[in-house]
Image (tube, grey):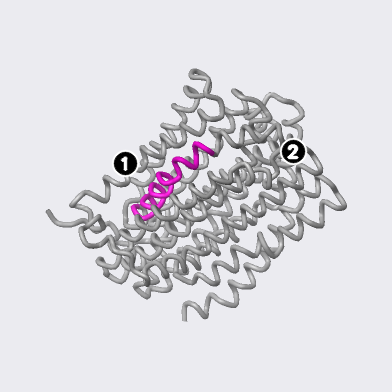
Amino acid sequence: MAELNSTDGLDTRKVGSLLWQYSVPAIVAMAASSLYNIIDRVFIGQGVGPLAISGLALTFPLMNLAAAFGALVGAGASTLVSIRLGQKDRDAAILILGNTILLNLILSISFSIVTLIFLDKILYVLGASKDTLPYAREFMQIILLGNVLTHIYLGLNNIMRSSGYPQKAMITTLLTVGSNAILAPVFIFVLKWGIRGAATATVCAQFIGTIIVFSHFLQKQHYIRFLPGYFKMKLKIIRDIFSIGMSNFFMLTTSSLIIIIINLSLEKYGGDFAIGAYGIINSILGLFAMMIVGFNQGMQPIAGYNFGARKFPRVIKVYKHTVITATCVSVLGFILGEIFPKQIAAAFTTNEALKNLASNGMRLCMAMFPIVGFQMVTASFFQSIGKAKISILISLSRQVLFLIPALLIIPLFWGLNGVWCAIPAADITSSVLTFLVLRSQLHKVMK
């Protein structure tokens, strides 16, 4: 049987149709993936209580940090696979696949061991109180035990998508989300496992996803698959994976730092319920951000392949298409967040105080959301063509250069509302910087 190479057409077919072909599965997958968090928070809020939502919100920085190590490998590996396929270098692509498995095993197991040992101390640093610590601890203990499954599943799913199987990657994600949605209410409401039930449902769903992606790369008819002799740690491949994936790693690690600062500020100016309100807001922000990430993932194999094939006009064209569509998504999020915040919050809790805090915070946090799509796409675009340093600069500008100072200064004058307003302030300033970097670097990079 002839081997299948599903990247055929990336350098010849219409860019617009290619973007939708690759983006729609990725968008569905990423939006569905964000439903993991939403499902957990809805069931926990309705089945365990408002303090449990606050406890869950405290785990965001730790979960982001775990995801950062997964993204360091997964994003870098998937981009490299696309570029190598564009260069018709199949052997290099398969070596990258083997290194991805080994790196994910090493990083995920090491992270889980260290974190479990110091879990309570870490959660106190993240802003836990005596009321919220038990919920955060119970949730993270289960999640960390299943961390290795999460890393392998997400890493291989990214490579499956970038090697020409976006629909299969989407279906895999939908199956894991569906499994989580079925198991979570059973574990929480029927078996009475509380917040541990939500975490157990998530890990079980990730196990199902891991089995599916592993079986894909074991099948002989696939062009990129597991082969004997390719599971060798190669320093150059590791360095290239880390170089490209570092943008995502820094973005997620700084996101963890940002959430810590936000949670500590919210605890100071609003208490445990304010942290819970941010947990609700972050669910909605994350849903639309993940949809934009889906467009970015659809853009990545097209831009990477054509950049490797030196077809630069197509690279520029797919970037422009992605910016336009991602902006439409961010505008939709802005409209819903501004018009229906109370109704959205009501899905997570029946507590009126928590609903009011979340409603007010959502309107303020999403005030500048329409411009977020441009900034996210531009950072991902430079990563897709292997220009990691530019991508890192753009990714970190919002969080480090602008959001951290805003979080430290604005609440001094406006209290709790100042914490919420720091987010749109950073959106504006980082988008201006992104535009300036794009204008100065794009022609130079293509030349």
Residue 302 place in picture, x, y as percent: 39, 62
Left or right for 354, reference 280: right
The number of numbered discs placed on residues in the rendered structure image is: 2
The residue pinned by badge 2 equals 274
The residue pinned by badge 1 equals 211
Q: Nearer the viewer, residue 334 or 217?
A: 217
Q: Is residue 347 visible?
A: yes
Tell me where residue 146 sits by quadrant. Answer: top left
Residue 321 place in picture, x, y as percent: 49, 60
155 in the magenta segment: yes
Residue 387 place in picture, x, y as percent: 49, 72
CA gap, disc 1 to disc 2? Answer: 39 Å
Q: Secondary structure at mark 1?
A: helix
| Region rendered in magenta | 141-160
User: How dense is the environment of label 2, judged by Cα within 10 Å: few (below 14), some, or many (20 and up)?
Assistant: many
Q: Taking 170 as reference, is 345 above or below it?
A: above
Tell me where residue 29 sits by quadrant. Answer: top left
Q: Amino acid at mark 1?
A: Ile
Q: Nearer the viewer, residue 394 or 206?
A: 206
User: How dense is the environment of label 1, judged by Cα within 10 Å: few (below 14), some, or many (20 and up)?
Assistant: some
Q: Which mark is residue 276?
A: none
Is mark 1 in CB contact (under 8 Å) with mark 2? no
- Residue appearing at x 36%, y 37% in the figure: 208
Q: Earlier in the sequence, mark 1 or mark 2?
A: 1
Q: Main secondary structure of the magenta part?
A: helix
Residue 413 place in picture, x, y as percent: 87, 52
- Residue appearing at x 70%, y 43% in the figure: 127
Q: Taking 211 as reference, is 197 above or below it?
A: above
